[in-house]
Image: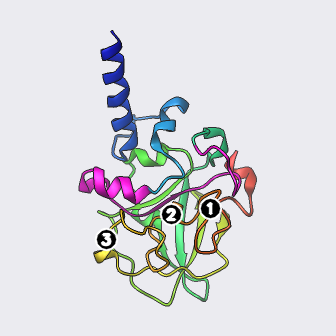
Amino acid sequence: MMGKRVILLLASAVAVASCGGSDSFSLSEAEQGWHFQGQHCLGCHNVDLKPSRHLLMAGTVFKSPNVENPKDLSASCKARLFVQLLNEKYEVVYDSRDFYDRNSAGYLGSGNIFILRRLLSDITPYGGYYVRVIDSEGNSLAQSQSLHSFSGIHNYDPRRNPADPLNRFSCNACHRYPDPQGGAPGFIYPQMNANLCK
């Protein structure tokens, strides 16, 4: 009996850690804990999972920049979130709503922001982008104060040096707590409209 439970738990972990799925797929509060929110997203998705689940960029939005236990789902933002990249004039260049797959169960996770690599294979190198987190209605929750560079995706190995300041594809590599990297304030959190995360 114990062996069957272990197999069932492992099967559940694999299923929940993946991003694919159907509209009817939903994650319980307990199951979402298997999704490793706050961890290095590309280090798992782009190494252990099949190409249809690879991510161009991804991260987790929490209610606070200094969450002690990222596995505590009450600490992550509960809204359906998207990410935008803006040029230095604050004009939207990329909007993850334009690369949305309604069959991706990743949107059911807690606090996820991501772009599936099969829907957008690369980000055009540029002087830098401001990064903005929005909800499905376009309400802003957070925006970077500094420009983020995205370059070298074709040569990017997510297992090596994920916090390389030229490869900002895995947000949680720098936006983490207690040891944020590259000037990040800690986890990504709502600097405005925090009520949308409840």
Residue where numbered disc 3 is placed: 121
Question: Which one is nearer the viewer's eye here, 179 or 42?
Answer: 179
Residue where numbered disc 2 is placed: 173
Q: In this view, does 183 lie to the left or right of 24?
A: right
Residue 113 at x, y percent in the picture: 51, 58
State the residue at coordinates (36%, 53%).
Answer: 44
Decide: marks 2, 1 in contact (CB < 8 A)?
no
User: Of the residues under marks 3 and 2, which one precedes in the sequence?
Assistant: 3
User: How many residues crowd around disc 3 within 10 Å: few (fewer than 14), some, or many (20 or more)?
Assistant: some
User: Mark 1 belongs to which amino acid?
Assistant: Asp
Residue 30 at x, y percent in the picture: 52, 30
The residues tagged by marks 3 and 1 sit, at their Cα atoms, a distance apart of: 30 Å
Q: Name the image quarter holding the C terminus.
A: top right
The residues tagged by marks 3 and 2 sit, at their Cα atoms, a distance apart of: 20 Å
The residues tagged by marks 2 and 1 sit, at their Cα atoms, a distance apart of: 10 Å
> Which range is magenta?
41-70
User: How many residues crowd around disc 2 within 10 Å: few (fewer than 14), some, or many (20 or more)?
Assistant: many
